[in-house]
Amino acid sequence: MSEPVTGAKQAADSARPVPKRERVARVLTEVLAPSVTGVVCPVAVGALSDTNPWRGARLGLLGAVFAIGLPYAYIAWLIRTGGATDRHVSRREDRPKVLAAVLVCLAGGIAVLALLGAPVLLVWLLAGEVLLVLICLAISRAWKISMHAAVAAGTAAALVVVLGPWALLAGLAVVAVCWARVVLGDHTTGQVSAGALLGAAVLSLIALSP
């Protein structure tokens, strides 16, 4: 008798109206996902740090292919083969293999950008992302730190370096994505706070570039 009751409960749960705040949180999670902010950041840094903005933007986009495109192609393959549940890699135990793949891709991106004579800030950005991923990899073995918050805050910090104080407005996006991840129950307040602080601290180091 328990199976029909369970099935009926699941059907009822799926049929329940989704609260407005949850719908908003889902939209923010997608719009401010690492797959989005992780592309905006290198393109902006490349364009703003090169004497030829269009060349810098193209090189930034190439960096985004290594930092975001290739890793997400790997995640898509993992999902198809049962190695991950979703593109946000919600299951903590799936994160180490994904982050390891990101490290390999970032290393390749740094090498290619250096060979192409990319702006120093752009190369340092990818190097900073390597450090961020290494720290998140170590933490993820025991605790589910928020990658959404880390990448969003890191992007905001990098934009402050290249744009100045006006880019602090990007902090609103960081607050929004942190709120969304907590509302959806994917992270605790502590996990998003730690992710945001870590991302901002690590990627602000590009200000030390030569």
Image: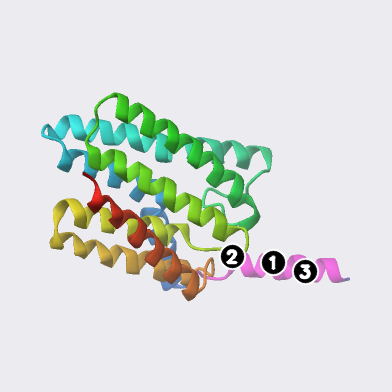
Query: Foreground residue, 20 or 152?
Result: 152
Can I make out residue 115 in this image?
A: yes
**Is residue 159 shown in magenta?**
no
Q: Which mark is residue 10?
A: 1
Question: What amino acid is labelled 1 in the image?
Answer: Gln
Quick one: SS at disc 2?
loop
Describe residue 54's horizontal placement relative to residue 115 as left or right. left
> In terms of image quadrants, where is residue 13?
bottom right
Q: Do callouts 3 and 2 mark residues in contact (Cβ within 8 Å)?
A: no
Examine the rendered structure and indicate whether residue 47 appears above or below residue 176: above
Measured from the top left, where is residue 137 in percent x and y?
Answer: 54, 53
Residue position marked by numbered label 3 in the rendering: 6
Q: Is residue 207 above or below residue 81?
A: below
Residue occupying image coordinates x 69% and y 66%: 10
Which residue is located at x 44 percent, y 35 percent? 107
The span picked out in magenta is 2-18
Horizontal side of residue 50 vs 69, given as left or right = left
- Give the residue number, with chain letter if any, for mark 2: 143
**Looking at the image, do the residues carrying marks 1 and 3 touch, with CB atoms under 8 Å apart?**
yes
Residue 49 x, y percent position in the rendering: 16, 41
User: Helix or strand or loop: what does disc 3 sit on?
Assistant: helix
- The amino acid beneath tag 2 is Trp
Label ID, residue 137 = none
Q: Residue furthest right?
A: 1
Q: Indicate left or right for 192 with 117 as reference.
A: right
Q: Depth-wise, is mark 3 or mark 2 nearer the camera?
A: 2
**In the current view of this chain or complex, which residue is farthest to the left?**
51
